[in-house]
Structures are given as structure tokens and as C-alpha cells.
Amino acid sequence: MVEITNLWLDLVTEVRNCKPDIISSSKDKNRILRKSEETALSKQCAAIVKSIGQLKELLMENRDGYIMGEVGGGKGLSQADMDTIDASADHICLKCSELIQSYNTIIDKTKLSEGGREHYFWLVQDLRNT
């Protein structure tokens, strides 16, 4: 078996000597790590996705009973139950709209390239249209 540890250490040492600005540069490390604005965007996206998931769950749980309604021979939901589901769905939709607006505000405050700004612009447009 060939001992590659010494060979590996020699290669790493050679790379560090040839390109010291690439290795262990805090500037590069900060460039690679997420910035606070990007973290805020990620958190806001997660909140939007979670809210949409809650809406889907609410609607899927009550779908059959809602469709059957009061005429379902006791299998459907009462008008009061349907009104409660409607109110809950409206609340979640309003929450999603507020989250999307907040997301747009974060984007406006974030330093982005022209391409990044265009990407987020179309993303918000798609979120508003769905």
C-alpha cells in the first residue's frame, strides 16, 4: 500500500505557497457565507412556504366535507363550519399577502446585482399572481 499522507501534505503546502490569497482568506470566507440580508430573505421565503402549506393542509383536511356541504346527508359540513373554514382560509391568504409584501420590502433594502434584482422582481410577481 502506498503512503499518500506525505504526498497530500506536500500538495497542500505547495498550493498554499502558490496561491496564499485563496487559502484562509477571511474576505473570501465572508463572501461565501450568507449575509444577513440573504438570511432574512431565506427566512421570509420559509414563512411564505409554511403559510401556503398551512392553507393547503386546511383545505385538504376539509375538502370532502366542504364539497358535500349541507346536502351531503349528514356527511358534509354545516354552514357554520364552512364559514369557519372560509374565515381561516382568508386569514391565511391575508397572512401570505403580508409576508409577500414584507419579502418585497426586504428585497428593496438588499444590495443586489441587476440580475438578482430582476430575479426577485419576477419571483414576487409570480407569488402575487398565484
Image: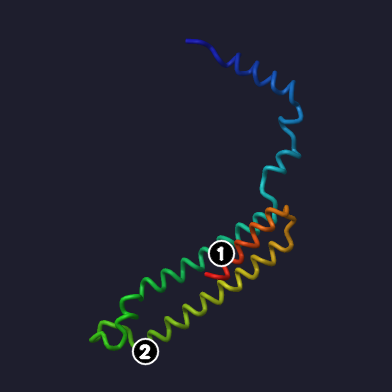
Colour scheme employed for the rendering of this structure: rainbow
Amino acid type of disc 2? Gln
The crowding category of the residue bearing disc 2, from other C-alpha atoms within 10 Å (few below 14, some 14 to 19, many at least 20), is few
- Between 108 and 7, the one lying in front of the other is 108
Q: Quadrant of residue 74?
A: bottom left
Question: Dot 1: what SS?
Answer: helix
Q: Pointer 2: what residue?
A: 79
Q: Quadrant of residue 21?
A: top right
Amino acid type of disc 1? Ala
Image point 72% across, 31% down: which residue? Answer: 22
Q: Is residue 86 above or below residue 58?
A: below
Image point 56% across, 74% down: which residue? Answer: 95
Picture coordinates of residue 42, whole percent (x, y): 61, 57
- Between 129 and 106, the one lying in front of the other is 129
Picture coordinates of residue 6, whole percent (x, y): 60, 14
The crowding category of the residue bearing disc 1, from other C-alpha atoms within 10 Å (few below 14, some 14 to 19, many at least 20), is some
Image point 70% across, 51% down: which residue? Answer: 35
Q: Pointer 1: what residue?
A: 47
Q: Is residue 86 above or below residue 126?
A: below
Picture coordinates of residue 36, whole percent (x, y): 69, 54
Image point 40% across, 73% down: which residue? Answer: 59
C-alpha distance separating marks 2 and 1: 31 Å
- Between 56 and 123, the one lying in front of the other is 123
Question: Dot 2: what SS?
Answer: helix
Left or right: residue 69 compared with residue 117? left
Left or right: residue 25 compared with residue 123? right
The numbered mark, 2 or 1, whose residue comes first in the sequence reads 1
Picture coordinates of residue 121, whole percent (x, y): 65, 62
